[in-house]
Image (cartoon, grey):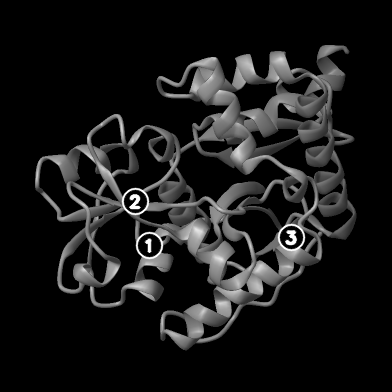
């Protein structure tokens, strides 16, 4: 491709968190095995709470990962991509403490959350509304619990696999709770596309991103090696396990199960007084 052709490409910025599962999904774009016609995809790395805030306050990223919780305030500007969602069937954010205890014992207790707009924070508010949320950067939550800065914490990302080794104990896994009570995966993160790109380009984004995820699944070893650059200490076995907790058949296509899980989350949030109304779900 000539320099003139290169500069003619439209740049689409894709915000995602610096985590192994998000990086794995981006592999096809990274390796040149997936494209969006006429566009160059540039990834922007920020933690999920920062991406939530950025989407709410600036909406400058054409495509971005956001928490399912934050999307309730973003539906007017962004549509949900059918691919790229993180849903956990039987696993999700975990409330941890220094010693065994019941979730109900956290009423009035300080509980670390990885950001007010995260789905982890929303799940805590729904299931234990009397707890006192304390915002802590996600990767510091285990240490904050261990140090007694908070009585418990809601952990996400790699800590879901390593918290026992760090000396913490599980209070509740929200993914297990949803599976056993609701028979649904818990919806955590979404990838969304800005509506002002127009229907044709929005569909092209969805098609291209699905191809990126499919390329990762078809080139597992290479994709995992790339993803583990963002794995924060996970070895290959742990990394593969973590990635495929959140990259599965529902990641390629939310489908009816994914839509039902999102509708259930928003209905619970409205019932708990955490949302005024459920957002309109347009899935591209």
**Quick one: label 2 or label 1, which is nearer the N terminus?**
2
177 left or right, relative to 10: left
Quarter of the figure with residue 144: top left
- Circle 3 — which element? helix
Q: With respect to residue 197, does 240 lie above or below?
A: above
48 left or right, relative to 226: left
Quarter of the figure with residue 120: bottom left
Q: Position of residue 156 (x, y in %)?
A: 42, 45
Residue beneath the point at 76% across and 69% down: 282
Residue placed under numbered mark 1 in the picture: 121
- Circle 2 — which element? loop
Residue placed under numbered mark 2 in the picture: 114
**Quick one: label 1 or label 3, which is nearer the N terminus?**
1
Residue placed under numbered mark 3 in the picture: 196
Q: With respect to residue 279, does 13 lie above or below?
A: above
Q: Residues within 10 Å of mark 1 (few under 14, many from 20)?
A: many
> How far apart are labels 2 and 1 at the CA level?
7 Å
Q: Are marks 1 and 3 in contact (CB under 8 Å)?
A: no
Q: Position of residue 5 (x, y in %)?
A: 87, 21
Residue beneath the point at 79% across and 19% down: 219
Say which of marks 1 and 3 sits in front.
Answer: 1
150 left or right, relative to 42: left
Q: Which image quadrant: the C terminus?
A: bottom right
Q: Position of residue 129 (x, y in %)?
A: 30, 77
**Residue 138: mark:** none
Q: With respect to residue 22, does 234 lie above or below?
A: above
Residue 14 appearing in the image: yes
Can you name the residue that lies furthest to the left here?
148
Say which of marks 2 and 3 sits in front.
Answer: 2
């Amino acid at each position: 491709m000539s320099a003139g052709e290169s500069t003619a490409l439209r740049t689409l910025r894709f915000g995602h968190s610096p985590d192994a599962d998000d990086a794995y999904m981006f592999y096809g774009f990274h390796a040149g095995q997936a494209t969006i016609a006429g566009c160059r995809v540039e990834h922007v790395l920020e933690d999920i709470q920062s991406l939530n805030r950025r989407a709410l306050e600036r909406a400058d990223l054409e495509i971005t990962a956001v928490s399912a919780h934050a999307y309730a305030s973003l539906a007017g500007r962004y549509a949900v991509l059918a691919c790229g969602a993180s849903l956990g069937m039987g696993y999700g954010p975990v409330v941890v403490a220094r010693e065994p205890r019941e979730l109900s014992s956290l009423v009035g207790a300080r509980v670390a959350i990885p950001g007010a707009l995260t789905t982890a924070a929303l799940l805590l508010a729904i299931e234990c509304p009397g707890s006192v949320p304390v915002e802590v950067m996600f990767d510091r939550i285990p240490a904050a619990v261990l140090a007694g800065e908070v009585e418990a914490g809601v952990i996400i990302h790699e800590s879901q696999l390593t918290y026992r080794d760090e000396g913490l104990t599980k209070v509740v896994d929200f993914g297990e709770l949803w599976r056993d009570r609701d028979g649904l995966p818990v919806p955590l993160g979404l990838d969304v596309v800005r509506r002002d790109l127009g229907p044709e380009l929005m569909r092209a984004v969805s098609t291209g991103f699905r191809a990126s995820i499919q390329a990762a699944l078809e080139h597992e070893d290479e994709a995992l090696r790339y993803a583990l650059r963002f794995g924060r200490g996970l070895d290959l076995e742990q990394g593969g396990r973590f990635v495929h907790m959140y990259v599965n058949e529902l990641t390629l296509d939310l489908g009816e199960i994914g839509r039902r899980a999102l509708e259930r989350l928003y209905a619970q949030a409205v019932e708990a007084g955490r949302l005024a109304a459920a957002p309109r779900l347009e899935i591209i």
